Image (spheres, rainbow, N blue to C red):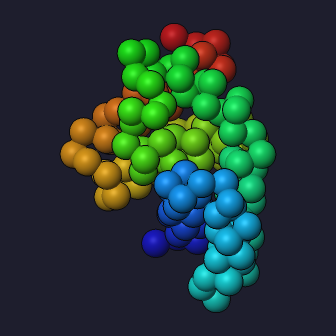
Amino acid sequence: MHKRTRARRLAMLALYQADILGSEFTSDAREWLSSVGRDKEMRSFATELFDNTIKHLPEIDSLIAKAAQNWQLKRMAAIDRALLRMAVNELLYHREVPPKVVINEALELAKRYSTAASGSFVNGILDRIHKDRSGSD
């Protein structure tokens, strides 16, 4: 597994835990991310993804809610919600990463850590957000 893939997985897990346990977990998650594994670059990217997602959560949630027609955020599986939040953060604020890479990484994580239908669900929402943001059909 590549460094960035591992970093995304860790950031997703920290976002999932913060979502389930509440905002008081945020500092604990950040501390956990800064200490997990031996690779400083991987830890740094995971922490950056986590922090930036938390920082821009209202904007990110608004985009997800708009793209997920007929789905309320609170009704989504918590792991899907964490994954979508992280991926939307990356689409918005990490322009150096091609959108196809972000979407593919999220799709693979959804397939691995969520339900059988999550891959299609996550792909559809992220694709819609990407198309809306880029103005393409």
Q: Residue 76's quadrant in the figure?
A: top left
What is the number of callouts on the image? 0
Q: Compared to 33, does 57 lie above or below?
A: above
Residue under the point 61% across and 24% down: 63
* Residue closest to the eye, 81 or 10: 81
Q: Residue furthest bottom?
A: 38
Residue under the point 74% across and 56% down: 51
Q: Compared to 87, does 136 lie above or below?
A: above
Q: Position of residue 26 (x, y in %)?
A: 69, 61
Q: Is residue 112 left or right of residue 44?
A: left
* Residue closest to the eye, 104 or 65: 65
Q: Position of residue 97 (x, y in %)?
A: 66, 47
Residue under the point 68% across and 71% down: 28
Q: Position of residue 92 (x, y in %)?
A: 71, 35
* Residue closest to the eye, 9 or 78: 78
**Res. 101 in view:** no
* Residue closest to the eye, 80 or 110: 80
**Res. 79 in view:** yes
Residue under the point 58% across and 71% down: 3
